[in-house]
Amino acid sequence: MTARMRLQPADVGVGLTGQRVRDRLIEDLRNSGIADERVLNAIRTVPRHQFVDEVLASRAYENNALPIGFGQTISQPFVVAKMTEALLRDGPKKVLEVGTGSGYQAAVLAALGLEVFTVERIGELLRTARKRFRGLGLHVRSKHDDGRIGWPEEAPFDAIIVTAAGPALVEALLAQLAPGGVLVAPVGASSGQTLLCLRKQADGGIVQEELGAVVFVPLLSGMTD
Ligand code: SAH
């Protein structure tokens, strides 16, 4: 009994969510090709363990997606980093996210000083994410809606990030992109998608770049409580 207690120091939880494990994750991201120091800093700073259930907190700084309930997941840190890096390239100010989920991606964008708008179709996930934003003092505007319609009242956006996978690009979202703006979205089959980065030219034309293979949960229609 005593021996076991010695093996379980009171700060073990702190250790598994503390600076050392976060630094290890940052090294992992660097080795995977993430080079933007602003992105690495934001990921080091935002407490990912507060965006998952307590029982998963000790795994929050592993480079993996984790379940957040309702069949949804918090994206893998590498994918968050990759999408954020692509989105930051042209110095955006106003950003729309479709698929708030845990709120982690939105928090990373807010930590970078961006003006963040995020839309989630599952009410319960959004309520939990809002508590997290408040608890961390992050200013994020959010809406319970089908994000495939975007946020027309707030358009245009300098960047739009879609964190759920659809079979094709959503036209309404492209329409809400400012000239020079960038849209990052996984597009393809439910079993696996290509992460696309689209840039809207001043003349309205679109330049497309492929960022790699990803697997996201599906972009669904309608809303639920
Ligand atoms: N960015 C999230 C990832 C969550 S997973 C994070 O950092 O945790 C994708 C999320 O997209 C899920 O919460 C899912 O409910 C949501 N989603 C799927 N289709 C949607 C739609 N049409 N509108 C808004 N949110 C949607």
Image: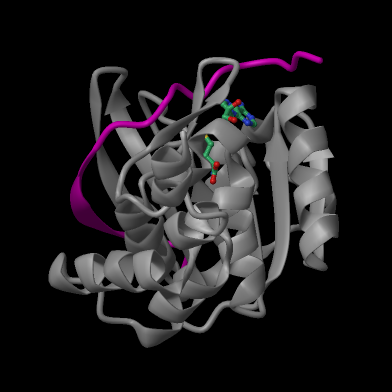
Q: Is residue 206 magenta?
A: yes
Residue 107 x/y as whole percent = 64, 60
State the image coordinates of residue 90 (x, y, percent, origin top left).
45, 81
Report the side of 164 relative to 21 (left or right): right
Along the viewing direction, whichever of 66 and 109 lies nearer the viewer: 66
Nearer to me, 173 or 112: 112
In the rendered view, does 189 fall on the left or right side of 88?
Answer: left
Q: Main secondary structure of the magenta part?
A: loop
Which residues fall within the magenta stretch?
A: 202-225
Residue at the (60%, 16%) spot, across then down: 70
* Residue 135 position (above or below residue 146): below
Q: Can you see residue 75?
A: no
Depth order, front residue of 174/126: 126
Say which residue appears at 76% left-offset and 50% top-offset.
132
Image coordinates of residue 161 in percent, x first then y, are 51, 52
Front in this rendered view, residue 150 or 101? 101
